Image (tube, helix red, strand yellow):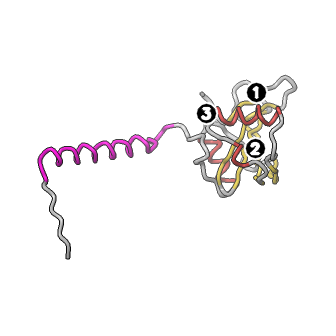
Amino acid sequence: MIVYTVKFSKKKAVAILIAMAIVIAAIILAVPKEGESAPTSAAVRVQTADDCLAYIESLGYTAESTPLEQKEVTIPETFDSVYTEYNRLQLECGFDLTDYKGKAATLYTYAVTNYPDEPEVRCDLLVRKDQVIGGNLYTTAIDGFMHGLRPIDG
């Protein structure tokens, strides 16, 4: 049997307590507080269309309960200029589609009913393996807009 002894001083005890306090503070700061806006990174997990709707609502949008469309899509192996620009939009919101090149995903499209001053707004969510990997909001108007998934007041 081998026995090790360690001399334990007050300095070591204080250093250990400070290190533990830093770790606890980091954990507390990492946990979102009630009322904070929803995460827009790929950490968002969804398993059903209802989960998708709940995520959209967590961003402050109201959407119709049933998706207008739900279909399988494939992220292109090679991004053309359009997909490169679309991924730039995703990067601004904490998503990155480059890891999903050539992979299948489910595209959910919802009608948004409370977008300010815009009557025909849609929300697309790209989901792969129960995880939101991207998405956007856009208007169906000819002179419309498209932006990434961000809170309604953001």
The type of residue carrying mark 2 is Tyr
Q: Position of residue 32 (x, y in %)?
A: 46, 42
The residue closer to the viewer here, 77 or 134, is 77
> Residue at image x 61%, y 52%?
45
Residue 151 badge: 3
Ranked by sequence position, the earlier of labels 1 and 3 is 1
Q: Amino acid at mark 1?
A: Glu
Mark 2 residue element = strand
Say which amino acid is labelled 3.
Answer: Pro
Foreground residue among 14 and 67:
14
Separation of marks 2 and 1 at Cα, in angstroms:
15 Å
Label 1, residues with CA under 10 Å away: few <14, some 14-19, many ≥20 = some
Q: Which residues are magenta?
A: 8-36
- Find residue 1 and report its image quarter: bottom left
Around disc 2, counting alpha carbons within 10 Å, would you say few (fewer than 14), some (14 to 19), or many (20 or more)?
many
Residue 5 is drawn in which quadrant?
bottom left
Principal secondary structure, stretch drawn in magenta: helix
With respect to residue 60, does 75 lie above or below? below
